[in-house]
Image (cartoon, rainbow, N blue to C red):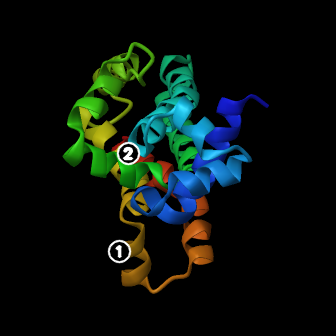
Amino acid sequence: MTTEEKIFNAARIIFQRKGFAGARMQEIADEAGINKAMLHYCFKNKQMLFEAVFMNAFSQLAPQINGIFFSQDSLFDKIRKFTHSYISFVILNPYLPAFIIQEMNNNPEFVMSFFKNENRPNPTILISQIEKEITDGIIKPINPKQLLMNIISMTVFPFAAQMLVKGMLQISDTEFYTMMEERKTSIAEQIINSIKR
């Protein structure tokens, strides 16, 4: 394992445990088994490290998502695969949704730079497929971007507002993650049932 891989793995653990604000570079260095000077040599500050970890994580997710978007699968299968892949990814990287929201407020240039990256998730083909299935009478008329927004909102919100969800529903961490596992399929089926003719 390279030093960078050790740092990324350690940073994920600490960011997940402490959140971005609570994480300390010394803790990340200790978790990685390196000294703080080496960590600062690789990443000057916590913000730079988090951005690198963020981009590294999404560089793993984007090909999965684009693989679904660009596949020859039916629209319904793509919806099922998307919710399953996205929720599985966020369960492994639970700090990311809250970080994205924080960064959209504090560092919008970084977030927008990600979405200009050529390797970002690209729904163009999926949008065309939705439009065709509307024309063919397979699904009800719906704005394709509204449909994508519904899918993304239903998958992202519980993670982005995890404390709110747990508090309102009075559920434990274990119950929350059990529910998230269930949502891998329940969201897809709910969306599909709402749009199919």
Quarter of the image where one finds residue 39: top right
Tell me, yes or no, if residue 88 can be seen here. Answer: no
| Residue at horizontal 50 percent and vertical 57 percent from the top | 24
On the image, numbered disc 2 is attached to which residue? 151
The crowd level at tag 1 (other Cα within 10 Å; few <14, some 14-19, many 20+) is few
Q: Which of marks 2 and 1 is in front?
A: 1
Where is residue 76 drawn, in percent x and y?
49, 36
Q: In the picture shown, does residue 85 fall above or below 52?
A: below
Tell me, yes or no, if residue 62 can be seen here. Answer: yes
Q: Which residue lies furthest to the right in this view?
A: 1
Which quadrant, please, contains the N terminus?
A: top right
User: In the drawing, does residue 37 fall left or right of residue 43?
Assistant: right
In the image shown, does 113 or 191 lie closer to the viewer?
113
For badge 2, the amino acid type reads: Ile
For badge 1, the amino acid type reads: Leu
Where is residue 148 drawn, in percent x and y?
33, 37
| Residue at horizontal 22 percent and vertical 46 percent from the top | 106
On the image, numbered disc 1 is attached to which residue? 164
User: In the drawing, does residue 80 fall left or right of residue 174?
Assistant: left
Which quadrant, please, contains the C terminus?
A: top left
Q: Distance between the residues labelled 2 and 1?
A: 20 Å
Where is residue 56 drawn, in percent x and y?
54, 30
Q: Look at the numbered disc 1 and give the secondary structure of its residue.
A: helix
In the image shown, does 108 or 97 lie closer to the viewer?
108
